[in-house]
Image (spheres, helix red, strand yellow):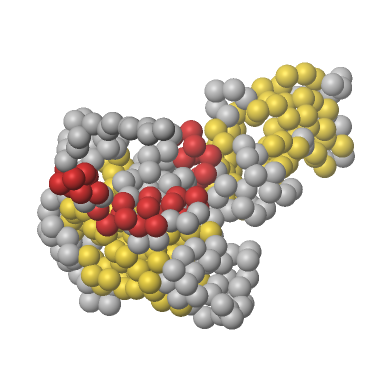
Amino acid sequence: MTVRANKPAFSIREKLKELQKPIGLKGSELMRAETAQEARDFVSAGRKNLIINGGFDVWQRGTTGSVSGGPAYASADRWRMYVNTSTTMTLSRQTFTAGQTEVPGNPSYYARFDWLGTGASQFFGLEQFIEGCHHGSGDYLTVSFYARSQLGDDMYLGVNQNFGTGGSAQQNITNSLIELETYWKKFVYVLSVPSISGKTINKSDDNLSITFYRNGTQNSYLELSNVQVEVGKNATEFEHRSYGEELALCERYYQKHTTSSDYRVAAIRSNGGSTQGTIQYLYRTMRIQPNTSVITQPSIKIVRQLDDVTGAAYATLSISAKNKNEYQMTASIAQSGASQILAFSAVYDFDAEL
């Protein structure tokens, strides 16, 4: 028995053209990926930006701050200013015009790093320390950002592996020229990263440092937006995170507690001049047990008088961290024997920066 099968006619030429459809270089790499992880790496999927607050949305310390002679965190979270003279450097928050298109993604803010040159030996910079020196080890890092300067004067990008206190000597990755203009321009640097194999590393404070710096005397300022550092050779679009998520990442390193509107309650007992306070919880676990300071001494409410003693006078509030999660509020009451439940209205902070 003979079976015949009929198939519609087709053009061999057209079928061959379909096989030659362009898929691009990255498409070819993606098709060659042998595992799901390789495919994710090719397209930089998942969480990618190692920089925290690269969009300059979080300013817990204030929307402007200055430093003179030495390093300090003064305004934008996670960004430290440095100058080696007594000249004043200022970092301030600037607002994008709604609907602008020079910097894509509709960012809300950018940073202005303002300097006043007073000496030829002056070195100044704006830097962030990324926790852990291992990022991109033996591979590549890609640094991308938008920038401009007031006078179109150039700066430099410095990237270093720092192995922590008592660890191996710092290892430089790059000191690259940034040829700035007076208008917004995107910069991309693909960097080959040395391996950390054989290095002595102190895991308590090892890091990868990203620094925008300059030597010189010219009065000008640098403006930065959408700073991103990612592992690999791809400069992908800036990773926008919600304000709440960005704030949570920043609070691993710095927290500012402001209780002026909701009074933080603490039970205080004075016994022969000594005082005790209550244990409070930090907003989230910090990198290390933080340093503390009281920025604004509080006003006070007496919630309840526990003794018959009257006229107990409040003195000063102190804050001490107990560990990475808790702190103690302590106040002194001048009159011995007074027992009260007190509520404080104050501003104080916790610093666990690298």
Q: In this view, does 306 lie above or below 118?
A: above
Which residue ends up furthest to the front in the rendered image?
A: 1
| Depth order, front residue of 73/204 | 204
Q: In this view, does 324 lie above or below 279?
A: below
Residue 119: x and y in percent read 24, 73
Residue 109: x and y in percent read 30, 39
Q: Is there any visible trace of residue 237 in the rendered image?
A: yes
Q: Is there any visible trace of residue 70 in the rendered image?
A: no
Q: Is residue 178 above or below residue 20?
A: below
Residue 111: x and y in percent read 30, 47
Left or right for 86, reference 206: left
* Picture residue at 49% right of the left edge, 37% below the top: 245
Quadrant that contains the C terminus: bottom right
* Picture residue at 47% right of the left edge, 56% below the top: 34
* Picture residue at 40% right of the left edge, 51% below the top: 44
Task: State how many labels appear.
Answer: 0
| Depth order, front residue of 335/109 | 109
Left or right for 168, reference 311: left
Q: In this view, does 195 lie above or below 345?
A: below
| Depth order, front residue of 53/91 | 53
| Depth order, front residue of 122/19 | 19
Quadrant that contains the N terminus: top left
* Picture residue at 37% right of the left edge, 34% below the top: 2
Residue 259: x and y in percent read 58, 29
